[in-house]
Amino acid sequence: MSELTDTTLVPGHQASNAELAAAKGPSKGSGPGKPRSLWGDAWYELRHRPLFWVSAVLLVLLLTIAAFPGLFTGADPRDGDLTNHFLTKPELSHFFQADWFGYDVQGRSIYARVIYGTRASIMVGVGVTAAVTLFGGLLGMLAGYFGGWIDSIVSRIVDIFFGLPFLLGSMVVLNAFTERKVYVVIAALAFLGWTTIARVMRSSVITAKQADYVTAARALGAGTTRILFRHVLPNALAPTIVVATISLGAYISAEATLSYLGLGLADPTISWGIDISSAKDAIRDNPHVMLFPAGMLSLTVFAFITLGDAVRDALDPKLR
Amino acid sequence: MRGAKSAKWVALAAVVALAATACGGGDDSDSGSNDMNKGTADPKGILSAQLSEPQNPLQPANAKESQGSRVLRAVFSQLVDYEPGTGKLRYINAESVTPNKDSSVWTIKLKPGWKFHNGEAVTAKSYVDAWNWSANVKNNQTNSSWFQDIKGYEDVHPEKGKPTADKMSGLKIVNDNEFKVELTSSVSYFSYKLGYDVWSPLPSGFFKDPKGYGEKPVGNGPYKFVSWDHKKLIKVRKFDGYQGPNKAKNGGIDFKNYTTADAAYSDLRSNNLDWIEQIPNNALTNYKTDLGKRAIDQEYSAVQSIVPAFYTDQFKDIDPKVIQGLSMAIDRATITKTVLHGSRTPADSFVARGVLGYQAGALKEQVSYDPKKAKALIKEGGGVPGNKISIQYNADQPHKDWVDAVCNSIRKATGIDCVGDSKPDFQADLNARDKHQVKSMYRGGWVLDYPVNSNFMRDLYGSKAAGNTSGYDNKEFDKLANKADKAATLDETVKLYQQAEQVLAKDMPAIPLWFYKVNSGQSNKILGKIPYGQDGDPIFTNVQVKKK
Amino acid sequence: MGRYVARRLLQMIPVFIGTTLIIFLMVHVLPGDPIRAMWGDKAADPAQVAALRHEFGLDQPLWKQYIDYMADLFQGDFGKTFGGRPVSEEMNLAFPVTLRLAAVAFAIEMIIGIGLGAWAGLKAGKAVDTGVLIFTLIVISMPVFVLGYLARFIFADELGWLPPNVQNSEDIQQLLLPGFVLAMLSMAYVARLTRTTFAENLRADYMRTALAKGLPRRRIVGVHLLRNSLIPVITFLGTDIGALIGGAVVTEGIFNVQGVGNLLYKALGQREGSTIVGVVTVFVLVILVINLIVDLLYAVLDPRIRYV
């Protein structure tokens, strides 16, 4: 509950409702029976949006950093030297060197930590999005398509999860594991976040299954599985994709918030969230210690959210 | 005209104040009327102090945490207390506390004429009834086990089942101002224990309505309780009929509630609050420039250490040399100066400074930073199994920075990998310790209960001590500790414990890191420095408020 | 309509029971013994621990604890804290604070959000539109604790415009900064939503009709456009009230606000099941009722929607 207000956790009401309201369009707008042209159209639209390119370039860069951090810095992010480097200020002219962004409380290179921290954040974002889309999407689809008691049960479970406090939920999941690695944080966020996708999927499946071509397919004797995956799903997917892309950024932000509260990732994993959290004590004298990881974090979230935004606009003809 | 002029002054002052805060540390505390040593004391002046909401009702034996205890100490006086600085015993409500030959029966005489805040006389019965009530298991006082030395404790506080009596047989009233305490065995430092809040007397009304009295305590202390506006304010005022030597030098205390140290600190700087508990971590680097002479930087008797879990495969059969090596790989001097911003001082003993029996340099080599020797010792001792250690801590308190720094230091000096093992909160951390689930090492901390060295050793490293959660077991130490506890005089006890400390120094059941310091501050409404006790809490009765 | 409301109210029962049960189980699953932890780093006395555990009913089997709790709850008794105080009293202290903070945040979010969105919507495709879009993206990209520290650093520490902490929640001025931080995220969404519906409705037929009738532009925008565009925005704002009332652990923590978020955070640290379940129960009830009201409001505002 509470923290949803804080965390940009798209699973919360805010994002979901806003995006939902805006994202409902595509399934109506796409028109029956021509999914390919919808995606083609979307790509055409995307190519003509400057913000799309900005985010795409950023994302390629970030993914490269996440995959090969060693290419960008020679410094060891865990290597601290208290005697020499305690809270030294950034040397902004020392490009790509260990002291470029200065040193943190432990005398570790902030630049190296920012570079090495990219991987955890991106893995969390992508991991949670994948888990949530699969699980929430499946439940939402079943609820929407079959209706009746399945729908009732799923909807009530979704309601229940909506009321769960973010803190409590994540603490329970985190404590279920002995280690605080990336997959644990993914599990915690997915546990709390699947409801949004389930709702979105459910409502777009309900719209899609009433379409004439579905009735036609059923009249022709197509099986449930075939109807679901060949006819309903492709036409109901657009809003889910939109919400998923936009949430990806929000999950990265949520991981940082968890780490800030001491519930997220922990040593020896290197993460921006951890660094921001320990930098908060230095904010008065050495704001740069927080600035760089927070800046990188915001930049990454920005890249993903902007991409999601562009995708939504492209998929929604009403917004053009 | 006058009004306009003063308004202008106020505006100007506001601008100056703003400028001062904006620069992050205008030091205006030493000049003119702000000089903390100038001005006259106002005996009726009210002082405001930081507090967070006490967790339990304000019953003397029910305050396990410092917040409730802070209020209780204002409202209740004990038989004795400790002289600040030396930690020596001083009589408050007691006229004398005298042991028999083997320190197993203690005779306590009270100063006559003392009154509770409601006018009732403080008598031997007030003490005996209070102790009997507090010790009784069914009254659910968290500190009930403090009475376990007294004969008949098992009757009111059996290990299982219901109490069979409501009085401890060891407590005998001689007359209104005298009673005897018989202990189950000799405890030479029993009188030292009596300074804790647990041993407060209670008025007769308390036993009829403990809940109501917990909400609105009536005590015998220097301040009488006025009101408790939950989560906002607790008010106590000077008790004019107070007979003790530690009469309040101010008119009373307003305990204001804060949830963050940050909030309290900014109120202190704007002089809306006269005393804060602890400088927030983000201001530790420059609070001395912010506050000038109003900064408080004082050591108190608490020690922080890292403790190997001896039940793990890693430390089960470890050679003490390895632990000693790990200890020598920690650069305490640099870490306390940098990461901890001078808020701790390197430890040189298992016993904190300011405690009876503390020996400067009881640990010498063991706590000096020497990477070469550290490496050699670890190698000699057969190395650390797995070549990797972790230090468990709780993430809801600011432990991460020093744990990381200690780990860095060990890693750099010895090449043994070291990581912090963070538990989300204290409960999870404690649970893992109690259940023996710690993977390698854990952070340990100990604040004194009473200022005798036994408190820092027997209660932590005795193989049967309830506070020993590491599974440490040393027969030689147990034997010495046992002998020390049974010693007839305090001197003997202290000496024997000093010997026991040398046994520990060889065996290293824990790696002491540093002693705690209070980093705090006071407003410019206070005259002179706020004095502190050995437990790190201020002695509020001695605080003087300036006349306005 | 009546039947619809009745059905919705009936649906609340399983959600209510499910939520309380799940929270109950979750608190139980968390490692740590709240009674033992009262002793902190020091050794606990097993006999006293057992007695206290009995006092709080923690020695009962879990199902019995749950049933006892629910039975008390239906009589309006939320149980007591480990300090022996009624949980309802704790909530009485915390909820008004959070309500005030939520009201401030809500006002900020509504005024600035709708204002920015309408501005951008009316100038769709122009520089203002892009500016607002990028602004909202940046706001959404920043985690709230970064935003909180940043806002405090700039507006309180450096500029000194606003008090950095909340000492007295009845003073609106003190609530401005945390209210602003709390509102930022939703504000960005409100702005974007308003912008979208404004831009959409600008092209609607009724606008063209109104324009053709020769109505002044101010009247068209103020009456026709605003009324039609705000329906989805109001729905969003409605659901958002619930989220705001839920309190915000991070924001409340940064600004020393003694609200529900703080209460919950503390209760979690102490494993105080009664408080946790109590707060969440009230919160879930609030959300369910607000959702219902929003859905009904939707029908009132949009005549095309009918509930049966």
Image (cartoon, coloured by chain):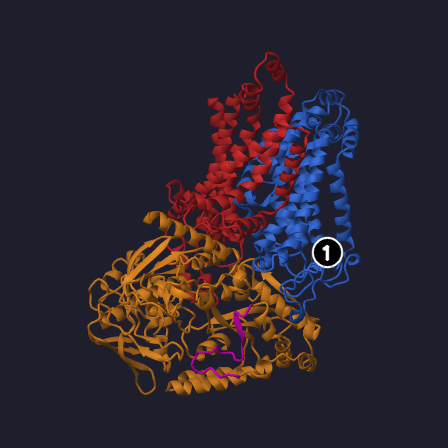
Q: Is residue B355 magenta?
A: yes
Vertical comparison of B41 with C142: above or below: below
- Is disc 1 placed on a helix, strand or loop? helix
Vertical comparison of A183 with A97: above or below: above
Give the main secondary structure, helix, strand or loop, of the magenta stretch: loop
Judging by colour alone, the chain drawn in red in this rendered image is C
Q: Which residue is mark 1?
A: A115
Judging by colour alone, the chain drawn in orange in this rendered image is B
Give the residue at x 58% y 60%: A285
Q: Give residue C39's quadrant in the image.
A: bottom left
Query: In the image, is A105 to the left or to the right of B434?
Result: right
Of C79 and A95, which appears nearest the observer? A95
Q: Position of residue B403 (x, y in %)?
A: 60, 67
On the question of residue B243 being in view, the answer is yes
Vertical comparison of A180 with B406: above or below: above
Say what amino acid the circle numbered 1 marks: Ile
Judging by colour alone, the chain drawn in blue in this rendered image is A
Q: Which residues are magenta?
A: B341-361
